[in-house]
Amino acid sequence: MHFDRVSRMAASAVALAALGACTNAGQLGNVLGGVLGTPTSNQVSATVQSVDTRNQVVNLRESNGQTIAVSYDNQTQVVYNNQNYQVTNLEYGDGVNARIQTTNNGGYYTDLIQVTQPVNGSATTSSSNVQSLQGTVRQVDVTNGWFTVDAGGGTVLTVSLPYNVSRTDQSKFQSLRSGDFVRFYGVYLNNTRVELRQFY
């Protein structure tokens, strides 16, 4: 009788310990919407909330409403339709799958962001900020979807393509060569970076 009671108590203790372990594991999983399986590398589906270029952080919102801050660096790839983009091309509302790793300080880092659904109308959301620009092409990176332009006065702009670039502009971009003079409409992302709206 005493033995049975001890056995039951031991079994209860084991069950409680197991429950505690599950609870702790659940807390880690909840951080990233309960989709984390291992602490090394995981895929997370989310919506872009903002990109903090100063701190190199992308804020992502999961389907459960939870927001997580994920760091990035120059090695981070952004891919849409087999075309590479800059992290700064990401816009509020873009649907993405991010490959996330835990860092030594308990934070999160992504080396790959795949855009699954770019936000609709991204080309018109900043229409009021569209400017007419021109200059001489200095460098073209077809793989990553950007080119640099000497706009005069010692100003060199890096111009990146948007997700919803037209076939005409895509073709024009791919035919650019160093030394070409180009005219285009674009929106400033910062003092030296511009997102293309269209060539003219």
Image: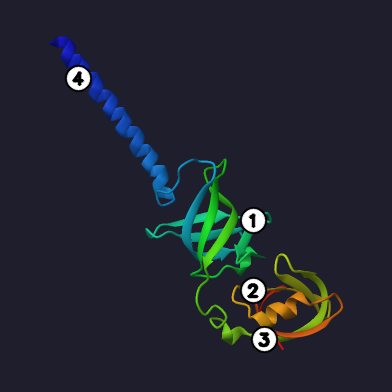
Which residue, given by chain and number where applicable, does mark 4 sit on?
8
Label 4 crowd bin: few (<14), some (14–19), many (20+), radius 10 Å? few
Which residue, given by chain and number where applicable, does mark 1 sit on?
76
Quadrant in the picture for the C terminus: bottom right
Give above or below for 179 relative to 25.
Answer: below
Image point 78% across, 84% down: which residue?
Answer: 182
Label 2 crowd bin: few (<14), some (14–19), many (20+), radius 10 Å? some
Q: Position of residue 103 (x, y in %)?
A: 56, 44
Q: Nearer the viewer, residue 155 or 182?
A: 182
Give above or below for 95 relative to 180.
Answer: above
Give above or below for 182 relative to 95.
Answer: below
Q: Is residue 148 left or right of residue 48?
A: right
Looking at marks 4 and 1 on the same chain, the residue that comes earlier in the sequence is marked by 4
Q: Is residue 14 left or right of residue 60?
A: left
Label 1 vs label 2: CA separation? Answer: 19 Å
Q: Amino acid at mark 2?
A: Leu
Of badges 1 and 2, nearer the viewer stands 1
Of badges 1 and 3, nearer the viewer stands 1
Of badges 3 and 4, nearer the viewer stands 4
Which residue, given by chain and number where applicable, does mark 3 sit on?
131
Q: Amino acid at mark 1?
A: Thr
Image point 61% across, 58% down: which residue?
Answer: 56
